[in-house]
Image (cartoon, rainbow, N blue to C red):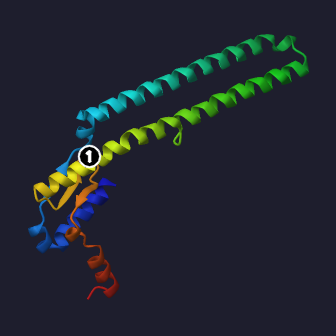
Amino acid sequence: MTKVVVSAFVALMVMAPSLSAQTKYGIVNTETILKELPAAIESSKKLEAFATAAQDTLRMMQKDFEQRIEQYQKQQALMSAEAKKKEEESLQGLRMRFLQYQEEKLGAQGEVSRLRESYLKPIRDKVAEAIAFVAKEEKVNLVLDKVSGVVLYSEDKADLTYKVLDRMKRGDK
């Protein structure tokens, strides 16, 4: 993705020399900001503690499951067909609870992801405000993230969307 953004940025500079002569650019390393910002550090610690607790619970559940399987395998020969079936269903239930807990806590839509978003959204909003403030103060028209190449701030006059669209609709004349 970064290559696409950089390519588009280079194309913009080639296609719009008059704009580039008037445009002042800035670079921000958001990774550094998030590593050094006290609120982000605190949020990261809270999130890590929650994730560690969830992983510890999963390890306990897995250990219990493995012990139950081992016990079942030792006693299987002595069990009736009905007892085997009942124990296998119980083991399957344990396995399903493990997988469900794992998804609820650590999955893509799990509690850790939701907490991360709830912790980071206010921080990201404050970072965006600070970037916009500094960009205006420094009279910078366009700010890119050094890590991802994503545009973090741009003045409306730097937006060429409708000029490009107009050119494309008119064709290569």
Residue at 17% x, 67% y: name it.
13
Q: Is residue 100 left or right of residue 74?
A: left
Q: Position of residue 25 (x, y in %)?
A: 14, 58
The number of numbered discs placed on residues in the rendered structure image is: 1
Quadrant location of the C terminus in the rendered image: bottom left
Vertical side of 104 occupied by 89: above or below: above
Toward the viewer: 100 or 41?
41
Q: Position of residue 102 (x, y in %)?
A: 58, 32
Q: Position of residue 41 (x, y in %)?
A: 30, 31
Residue at 11% x, 59% y: name it.
139
Which residue is label 1 attached to? 127
Vertical side of 169 occupied by 121: above or below: above
> Where, by quadrant of the figure, is residue 68 drawn?
top right
Residue at 80% x, 11% y: name it.
75
Q: Is residue 7 left or right of residue 107?
A: left
Tag 1: amino acid = Val
Q: Is residue 119 left or right of residue 80?
A: left
Toward the viewer: 43 or 101?
43
Quadrant location of the N terminus in the rendered image: bottom left
Vertical side of 167 occupied by 152: above or below: above
Residue at 58% x, 35% y: name it.
104
Q: Secondary structure at mark 1?
A: helix
